Amino acid sequence: MKILVTNAGSSSLKITCFAAEGLQEVAKGMVERIGQASPALRFSQNGGQVASRPVEAADAGQALRALVACLGEAGLNGADQEEGIVAVGHRVVHGGEEMTRPVLVTPEIKELIARYAALAPLHNPPSLAGIEAAQELFPDAAQVAAFDTAFHASMPERAFIYALPWELYEQDKIRRYGFHGISHGFVFHEAARHLGAEPSGLKAVTCHLGNGCSMAAVNGGAARDTSMGFTPLEGLIMGTRCGDLDPAAVLYLQEQKGLGPAEALELMNHRSGLLALAGIGSGDLRDIEQAAGEGAPRAQLALDAFAYRIKKYIGAYAAALGGLDAVVFTAGIGENSPTVRRLACAGLEFLGLEIDEKLNQEGGEGVREISAPSSRVRLLVIPTNEELAIARQVLRVVRRED
């Protein structure tokens, strides 16, 4: 028996196939440039050679069909229950206030996903298309939706509420939701396992740093605050997103620069962040670190500002948690940039947080500790695995443990 996990993005769709017993990964694939010119498919089995080829993929549903065909060619999609896909887990970015845990997909759940597409227009629609395609491809399999916002549902009201007229919360549900929740929850529990600590007694700040970035204050496995807000635009500086910004600046752009709402949103989401600060034509941190090393002053500013925002959130969340046991770095930047980790931790010795620069510079796979022996707060680098986290959630739902 196998579990299939789908992860639909704005222009890509990833799948990972797990053996239901032990959740061993047996295959994975991805279709990129969905709905664009020349979509491309990549697929590998048991960590072997990656096969790639062009494919027709006008939408996420068509992309999933192409990837499932690869599973069939690899003999991983048998017709009987002993060999085939018995459950499909779907990552859904936005589930609003209603979704606090993974659930079996029903017509009501699909309607909810469609309703919250207004708040996640790049992600919820392709997730829904993937769900509907999976229902056609695997009519006898359990379909489970896992929500990125669900992990943050434990935030107290004082942390998620905005100081706007109350009816805007009551009627329009304008509040902080938070995202990357599947990743934050996964690395928190991996940290507890590594430290030999009971999750219920652990206070940690988790830093999901990729092209999109967010941080979470986690106490006992429950999110108490997070940096992203009503949408994934708030919080840290990101690859092309501005992060925290005085809302009056948006009004200025509209009134003084003549930008319409869609234009202002496009500027803040796609033409800001590291891309805008560095001035090198790239928002990729690897390019920015290289340019900064070559003496480009704006690239150095982008790097410093990025790390400074992370440092501020670590300090704020240590205060919100009333103490701190661990800081976890994950995702592409968090796992692979010793420079960002060093800059983000510099000057935080007063919190009992000291980095060991030799350990920080060393690479390696799996969970790595980069704190100095004298550091009271443990510093960890933990590779995230959202697909495995979703597969675990699927098992709990199917076994009715959640």
Image: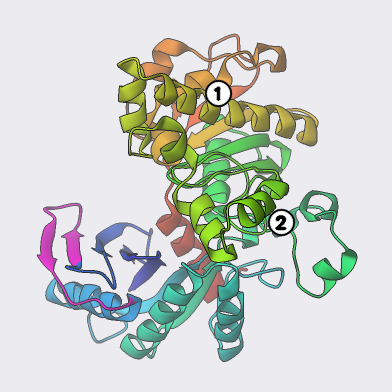
Sort mark 2 into few (<14), some (14-19) or many (20+) by Cα contacts within 10 Å. many
Which residue does the numbered mark 1 point to in the structure image? 344
Left or right, 102 with respect to 4, comes to right
Say if residue 83 shows up in the picture: no
Q: Looking at the picture, tell me which residue is in the foreground, 118 or 91.
A: 118
Q: Quadrant of residue 107?
A: bottom right
Sort mark 1 into few (<14), some (14-19) or many (20+) by Cα contacts within 10 Å. many
Q: Looking at the picture, tell me which residue is in the foreground, 60 or 84.
A: 60
Where residue 10 appears, as percent x and y from the top left, is 40, 65
Q: Amino acid at mark 2?
A: Arg
Q: Which range is magenta?
A: 40-59
289 relative to 211, above or below: above
Where residue 323 appears, as percent x and y from the top left, is 76, 28
Which residue does the numbered mark 2 point to in the structure image? 176
Say if residue 158 shows up in the picture: yes
Question: Can you say which quadrant of the picture contains the C terminus?
Answer: bottom right
The residue positioned 56% from the left and 78% from the top of the image is: 113
Give the structural element (helix, strand or loop) at label 1: helix
